[in-house]
Image (cartoon, rainbow, N blue to C red):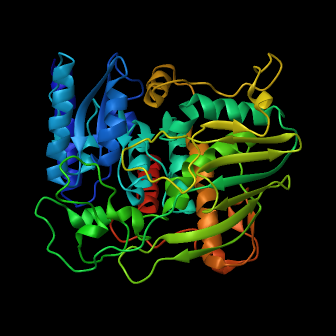
Amino acid sequence: MNQRCSRRGFVQTAAAGTFALGFPTLIPSRVLGAEAPSKTIQVGQIGFGRIAKSMDVPGVMKCQGVKVVALSDLDTKRMALGKAFIDAAYAKQGASVDLQLYQDYRELLARSDVDAVVISTPDHWHSQPAVEAAFAGKDVYMQKPAALTIAEGRLFSNAIRENKRVFLLGSQQRSSEQFHRASEWVRNGRIGKILRIEIGLPGDPAGGRKDEMPVPANLNYDMWLGSTPEVYYTEDRVHSQRDAKLESRPGWLRCEQFGAGMITGWGSHHLDIAHWAMGWEGTGPVAIEGRGEFHTGGLWDVHGAYDVTLTYADGTPMRVWDQYPNGIRFIGEKGWIFVSRGPAKMTASDPVAPGQPLKALDASDPKLLEGEIGPDEVHLYRHRGNHHQNWVDCIRTRAETLVPAETAHRSCSACLLAHIGMKAGRRLTWNPETETFVGDERANALLARAERAPYGTRRAYERLSASRKG
């Protein structure tokens, strides 16, 4: 009892001292001793918006032996919606939880009794909390894409590895049967040598109101901007303040300041499947060439129409084009296999590209979709059903998940390379080992972004690494 009280007092004192400085140095996991989850895995939810409500919170709550005990959001209105949602869900199960609320997620991370966190924040707030969570001894489930830049992705992957954390990316397609089967058939040569890959992704519209508005009292807007440049508040740049159901697509998805648009939004799903099927999970393309049109006039400025080809070391080209159906087509010497979500949507507001096929799995010859993988063939990691369950299972066993950090970084990097290729408008040569462009400093300058103090993945990583060494 005394030891427990003393430990709690230490955490509170340390947290108070560090937060007084404005940006905390998180307490290292070795100090808290948080190396293994308790019998009940206690989860903190960071961010409560459209994806958290529709996917992440319900997904985690379906897992046995897991309890959501903490919630953080920079918008207190959304945090209140999250508390009501979680309380109601537990009440429906005949259970209850003393859900603790934090507008600043770093206070959540300072809790020694939180074993793991789910990060469901805007894209520009993915990698920094993942790095900080890893150093705080928390296992991490994070929504895609893995990072805003390739440099951030490298730091986040390193932090997960160095701190021996269990990580799973929200690339749910790997838990869907049709994507697993298609990937195994391709990997095992059912359609022969792959000649090319065609990927179709939906696009984003132009628009967005530019008029400056007062910052809502319920939103910590400075922190919401994070490491990105300071700009005035307008609702279409952030998220709707009137959407109590949290169903509308937020404006930040369409602003380059906070993400790269659909090339990472859906590209993180589809390029990940291509990497899985081809065995490219630890590498990337060696050449990029393409073009892209970027919206002007309104607030939203992500890419519109685009056409980019990524070529890999074995010579296989992967063309990503907005005119293809939404999905992945593997074209081989013996025919083709196409895989998609079919008519299914992950969320109600998911966009659908023109020509969306009704079939989730298709082939040039139906016989290509028959038969099972033999005992001596390549069997890809299999997890059926609730994607979050794979994370929880691996937290208990400390095994690698279906989409570990390095895999997440590499698939995100391929998307970001396509985005850079759109902007460059010229052929680029990429070294996937050094993660730099060859002989092109203009392109290399796009691998990272300046970080607005005191925020940023690089700042967090360097500070926490130095603190550990000290």
Which residue of the protein is positioned furthest toward the bottom in this rendering?
Answer: 297
Q: Which residue occupies the foreground of this view, 338 or 296?
A: 338
Q: Residue at x 52, y 58 (%)?
A: 202
Q: Residue at x 69, y 28 (%)?
A: 380
Determine whether 364 is above or below 76 in the image. above
Whether residue 96 appears in this view of the structure is no
Location of the N terminus (image quadrant): top left
Q: Which image quadrant for residue 193?
A: top right
Q: Position of residue 186 (x, y in %)?
A: 77, 36
Q: Which residue occupies the foreground of this view, 388 or 176?
A: 176
Q: Which residue occupies the foreground of this view, 281 or 36?
A: 281
Whether residue 376 appears in this view of the structure is yes
Q: Which image quadrant for residue 263?
A: bottom right
Q: Position of residue 386 (x, y in %)?
A: 45, 27
Q: Position of residue 172 (x, y in %)?
A: 51, 37
Q: Which residue occupies the foreground of this view, 366 or 388?
A: 366
Q: Position of residue 207 (x, y in %)?
A: 36, 74
Position of residue 445 in the picture relative to residue 82 (left or right): right
Determine whether 56 is above or below 399 in the image. below
Determine whether 294 is above or below 262 in the image. below
